[in-house]
Amino acid sequence: MNLAHWLARSAQAGGERPALFLGETQVANYAEFDAGARAVAGWLQAKGIKPGDRVAIFMKNTPEYLILFYGIWYAGAAVVPINAKLHGREADFILDDSGAKLVFASPDLAHGLRQDHRVLVAPSDAYRAILAAVPVDAVADRGADDLAWLFYTSGTTGKPKAVIITHGMGLSMALCYGVDVDQVSGEDTALYAAPLSHGAGLYNLMHVQAGARHVCPASGGFDVPEILDLAEHFGRVHMFAAPTMVKRLTDGARAVGRSGDGLRTIVYAGGPMYTTDIIDAVDHFGPVFAQIYGQGECPMGITALHRVCVADREHPNWRGRLGSVGRAQAAVEVRIGDADGRPVADGVAGEIMVRGQTVMPGYWNNRGATEATLKDGWLMTGDVGMMDDEGFVTLQDRSKDVIITGGSNVYPREVEEVLLEHAGIIEASVIGRAHAEWGEEVVAFIVGQVPEAELDALCLNRIARFKRPKTYIRVESLPKNNYGKVLKTELRALLKP
C-alpha cells in the first residue's frame, strides 16, 4: 500500500480539519493539504518523474516539506530527505548516490548545491506555481516492498549509507507506534522541532492517518521558549526529541518556572538517555515521556519503553527498567546474540539482533554492507546490550565503542551514567586509549568543573575499580553530529599524539 493513501483518506473523511501550521498560523486544512500533494504529483509526472524515481528534499522544517512528502508518494516516486544542517558538499554526495532526479531546497540551502543538480527552491514563486498544476486523480499504485524513502545514515565514521525504507516498513512502524508507544487521535498535534529528514519526519505518518494537526515552529528548529508556547497554545502536543533536546527542554523550563502545559507525549531516542536526565525530566513535566530504540535500518521500530514504565517509581526494579530501552515492538523479534549470532542467556551481554516487518531489505546500491549487516534474516545492529527475564533490553554501547582493558570489557555508557550523577558534570563521554600494558585504558571527556578526586571517589563507590577513568579531560562541549550524537571519532582524534 502507498503511504499517501492515508492522506487521501484523512482528507476524504474530514477535509475541513486543520492540518498544517507554521507556528500558530494555519497554512492548510486536510483538503488543502491533499490538494497540494496531488498538484505536486501532477507536476512531477508532467516533468517525467516515474514510479520508483527518487526526489530529494533539502529543506528546513516547513509545512511545504510535508506537502512535498506526500506529493512525491502520490506520484509513486521515493523521497530522499536530506538533513538541512548538512554542508552542500555532503548534500551533493547524497544527490549523486541516490540518483535523485530533482531536489527541492530551501532558499538559503539551494545556493550551496552543485549547479548540475536539478534544483527547485521552495517556498518560491516557482513552487507556488506547482500548486496550480493539474492534480493527479489517484494515488499511484505501490506495493509493500516498493521504495518509499531513502534514509542516509549520519555517517559518523565515513560516507553515509542509504537505508531502503519501503512502504511496508513505514506502515509497520506507524502501526506499532499505536500498539507499543502511544495512541494518536484527531485532537492531537504533532510538533516538528527535530529535523523532518529523520525520526520526526517518520512520525508524521500516524498523525496524518489520524487526521491530527502538524506544526512546524516558525523558528524552523528547536527553541525552548517557542516549544513551550506552542504546546500551551495547541495542547495535546506529541513531539519526537533526541535526549540532548529533552535535557535542554527540562533545564530551560525549570529556569523560567514553566511546567510544560500542553505537552502530551515526548518520544525520545537517537542517542543515550542518561538515567539522571530522564528522572529530572519526569520530575518536572510528569508522565509524558516514552522511549523507543531503533535504527535507520529498522526505523523507530526495535523496542519501546511505555510512559508507564518511564514514570514508574514503585516497581522493585524501576531504575533498571528506566535504564533500559524497553521491550520488543509488536512487529519484530529481538534477541541478544554472541559473535556467531547464537542466542545468549538472559543477563548476558551480546549484539542486539532484530528481524521482522520493520527491518530494511538492504542498503541502496551497497551489496557488501547489506551482506555484512543482514545475517540469516536478522539485522545485526552493531549495538551491545542484554535482555532480562522480562524481555527488557538494556543498551550498553556500540560494539566498536567497547573498551577492553586488561582483558575485561568496559562499556562507556555505564561509566558515563556514573559521572553524570555528579551535579557538577554537564556532559560526559568515555572512550578507550591504547595502553602498552593493559591494551586500553579508560579516558573520560567531561564538561564541568569538578575535582578529579571527587570523580574518582564517585566511580569507586559505584563501579569496579578497573572501569574508573584513568584520565579526565575537560572540554567546553562535546562534538556532536547533526542528530545530536556525540562524535567519539573526534574525541579519539584529540588523543592522538
Image (cartoon, rainbow, N blue to C red):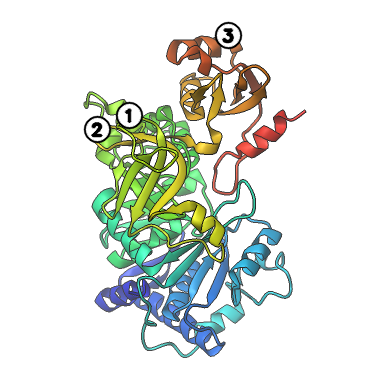
The reply to whether residue 435 is in sight is yes
SS category of the residue bearing label 1: loop
Q: For label 1, count other residues whose C-alpha is less than 10 Å away and answer few (under 14), some (14-19) or many (20+).
A: some
Q: Report the Cα–Cα distance between label 2 and label 1.
A: 8 Å
Q: Earlier in the sequence, mark 2 or mark 1?
A: 1
Horizontal arrangement in the rendering, residue 463 relative to residue 17 (left or right)? right
Foreground disc of the pair 3, 1 = 1
The residue closer to the viewer here, 184 or 401, is 401
Q: Three-letter amino acid code at disc 2?
A: Asp
Q: Is residue 114 above or below residue 348?
A: below
Neighbour class for label 2 at 10 Å: few (<14), some, many (≥20)? Answer: few
At 32% from the left and 29% from the top, the residue drawn is 347
- From this view, report whether residue 376 is shown above or below residue 352: below
At x 37%, y 89%, the residue is: 137
Image coordinates for residue 115, horizontal then vertical, percent: 74, 73
Q: Is residue 276 left or right of residue 43?
A: left
- In primary-sequence order, the first of circles 3 and 2 is 2
Residue 250 percent location from the top left of the image: 44, 35
Q: CA distance from mark 3 to mark 2?
A: 38 Å
Tag 1 or tag 3, which sits nearer the N-term? 1
Give residue 347's mark: 1
Q: Quadrant of the C terminus?
A: top right
Q: Quadrant of the N terminus?
A: bottom left
